[in-house]
Image: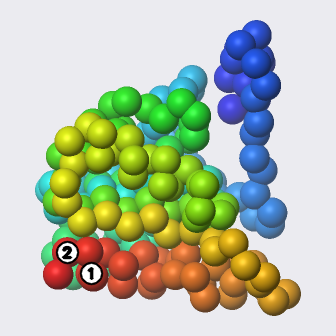
Amino acid sequence: MLHDAFALADDGPVVIRYPKGAARHSSVVGTGLHALRLAEGDGSVAILAVGKMVGAAEKAVADLAEAGVKATLWDVRSCAPLDPAMIADAARHRAVLTVEDGFREGGIGLSALDAVRRAGFTGAAEALGVPTRFIPHNKPDAILSSFGLDATGIVSTIDALLS
């Protein structure tokens, strides 16, 4: 991402967001502004995960597979602009879920859902994110879990979207 940021810097400011705590390790690394499809589903649900939430989404995809649901998973990577290939792919699914650990209101998830709807999507959709209200101090994982931003919450939201 640092290399890509230097390449993009001529066009304006670039932000790289580093997670607090341990980062997810992956052998799959993308380049440029392209999202990465980490799992190919059967058209039932597409998950668009941002940053740290990719790890929780990967666990949710594995849990869903055990229950017979084959989900598509995208690592969004670049939040602006959103990858048109990712948006087009998400629009072909029956349901779409975005997952981010940033604010839900005005966040990337709602922007992505808006783009998916403009691409012709008419199915069930939800954007998981942090609400814009006071959040009492706690361990980051406990806070995220309280807002459904963990594998259990993701699976529960997808179950509701598909029912």
Q: Which corner quadrant of the image does residue 154 belong to?
A: bottom left
Is the residue under label 1 in contact with that under label 2 (CB below 8 Å)?
A: yes
Residue furthest to the top: 10
Q: Is residue 20 left or right of residue 147?
A: right
Q: Is residue 56 left or right of residue 160?
A: right
x, y (%) of residue 124? Answer: 24, 66
Is 97 situated above or below 88?
below
Q: Amino acid at mark 1?
A: Asp
Is 44 situated above or below 16?
below
Asked if one can make out residue 9 in the rendered structure from this viewpoint, the answer is yes
Q: Which corner quadrant of the image does residue 141 belong to?
A: bottom right
x, y (%) of residue 107? Answer: 59, 55
Q: Which mark is residue 159?
A: 1
* Protein image colouring: rainbow
At horizontal 26% and vertical 74% (from top left) the residue drawn is 161
Is 82 situated above or below 156?
above
Crowd around label 2: few <14 · some 14–19 · many ≥20 (10 Å): some
Label 2, label 1: how many angstroms apart (C-alpha)? Answer: 5 Å
Q: Amino acid at mark 2?
A: Leu
| SS at mark 2 in the image | helix
Q: Is residue 108 left or right of residue 141?
A: left
At horizontal 57% and vertical 40% (from top left) the residue drawn is 79
Closer-to-camera residue (42/91): 91
Look at mark 2 in the image and give the residue it sits on. Answer: 162
